[in-house]
């Protein structure tokens, strides 16, 4: 906001406050526009680099998953503590996506995910052994790994026919999403978002979320469904958790809009979840 030519009475504090609020708001909007332009430039460069890299060939086989489950429904299982209370008998004939260390929960003893996503950087850095643990425990499951894990997994003496890689490098901003699994994709802020993108690409008409408590910004504990005793305290400051949750929320809002435009229904079936992007529907209502 430009104050040039505006004559203010020094005693009119209320008006001055209102003008400053407008100025702050305008700066926030300006930053948002500048960020969007930076993201767009990043995406142009990212696509050029992708087309010139070996990654283009590695992710190309993912085209076989396009609309492979057209018109069907699936369930994405996050690892929030609420998953402990899910009646897994209701999921035995459903198509399931597992994530991260779901393998360590009791749920896996009752159902086997058809698909499993490991996109977090820890699975090709500090948790490579954890990745191998998960891969070996579910030999019939199809896995989607971050492209950065390719060189590590490809160099091991193991069967990789059920492992596929995804290239996440595009910046998601505003309502922009690119979820073609056989190309450069928008980088998800967490693994549930990655699964939703994959499920949409695969043609699922209904997508249900379970174990997606979305409570990291509230809880002081880093709690998951597979914790047997006391969960460890969160090491990050609350402000960082709030910032991360905010970014994730707006990504979910963009996914909700994308789904609505394409006649896809995403439901949050997690009791007491703080994720508000999707319509609520309990698992008992569904099955």
Image (cartoon, rainbow, N blue to C red):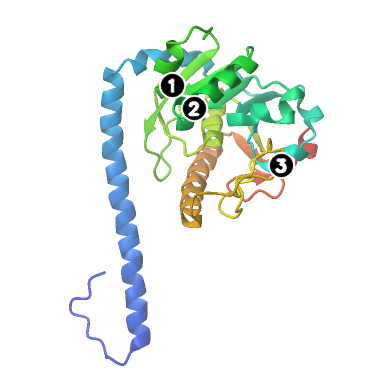
Residue located 28% across and 51% down the image = 34
Res 263 → quadrant: top right
Mark 1 nearby-residue class (10 Å; few <14, some 14–19, many ≥20) = many
Rendering coords of residue 284 (x, y %): 80, 38
User: Whole-Å distance between the Cαs marked 3 and 1?
Assistant: 31 Å
Q: Vertically, is 241 above or below 74?
A: below
Rendering coords of residue 68 (x, y %): 58, 17
Residue located 31% across and 48% down the image = 35
Labelled pair 3, 1 in contact (Cβ < 8 Å): no
Q: Is residue 83 left or right of residue 265?
A: right
Q: Nearer the viewer, residue 283 or 4?
A: 283
Q: Is residue 58 left or right of residue 111?
A: left
Labelled pair 3, 2 in contact (Cβ < 8 Å): no
Indicate the secondary structure of the residue bearing disc 1. Answer: helix
Q: Vertically, is 53 above or below 275?
A: above
Mark 3 or mark 1, which is nearer to you?
Answer: 3
Q: Earlier in the sequence, mark 3 or mark 2?
A: 2
Image quadrant for the N terminus? bottom left
Residue located 64% across and 30% down the image = 102
Rendering coords of residue 255 (x, y %): 51, 39
Q: Which residue is mark 3?
A: 229
Q: Which residue is mark 1?
A: 149
Mark 3 or mark 2, which is nearer to you?
Answer: 3
User: Whole-Å distance between the Cαs marked 3 and 2?
Assistant: 24 Å
Q: Which residue is mark 2?
A: 123
Mark 3 nearby-residue class (10 Å; few <14, some 14–19, many ≥20) = few
User: Whole-Å distance between the Cαs marked 1 and 2?
Assistant: 7 Å
Q: Earlier in the sequence, mark 1 or mark 2?
A: 2
Labelled pair 1, 2 in contact (Cβ < 8 Å): yes
Q: Is residue 285 left or right of residue 182?
A: right
């Amino acid at each position: 906001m430009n104050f040039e030519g505006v004559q203010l009475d020094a005693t009119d504090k209320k008006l001055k406050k209102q003008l400053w609020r407008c100025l702050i708001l305008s700066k926030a909007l300006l930053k948002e526009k500048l960020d969007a332009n930076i993201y767009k430039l990043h995406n142009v460069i990212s696509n050029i680099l992708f087309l010139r890299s070996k990654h283009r060939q590695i992710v190309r086989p993912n085209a076989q998953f396009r609309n492979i489950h057209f018109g069907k429904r699936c369930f994405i299982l996050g690892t929030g503590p609420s998953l402990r209370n899910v009646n897994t008998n209701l999921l035995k004939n459903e198509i399931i996506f597992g994530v991260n260390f779901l393998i360590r929960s009791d749920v896996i003893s009752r159902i086997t995910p058809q698909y499993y996503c490991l996109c977090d950087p820890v699975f090709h850095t500090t948790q490579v052994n954890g990745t191998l643990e998960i891969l070996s425990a579910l030999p019939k499951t199809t896995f989607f790994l971050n492209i950065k894990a390719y060189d590590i997994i490809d160099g091991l003496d193991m069967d990789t026919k059920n492992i596929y890689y995804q290239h996440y490098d595009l910046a998601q901003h505003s309502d922009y999403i690119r979820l073609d699994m056989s190309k450069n994709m928008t980088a998800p802020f967490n693994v549930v978002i990655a699964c939703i993108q994959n499920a949409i690409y695969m043609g699922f008409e209904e997508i249900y979320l379970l174990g997606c408590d979305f409570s990291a910004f509230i809880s002081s504990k880093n709690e998951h469904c597979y914790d047997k005793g006391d969960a460890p305290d969160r090491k990050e400051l609350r402000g960082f958790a709030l910032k991360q949750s905010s970014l994730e929320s707006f990504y979910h809002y963009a996914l909700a809009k994308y789904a609505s435009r394409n006649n896809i229904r995403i439901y949050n079936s997690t009791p007491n979840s703080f994720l508000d992007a999707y319509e609520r529907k309990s698992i008992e209502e569904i099955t």
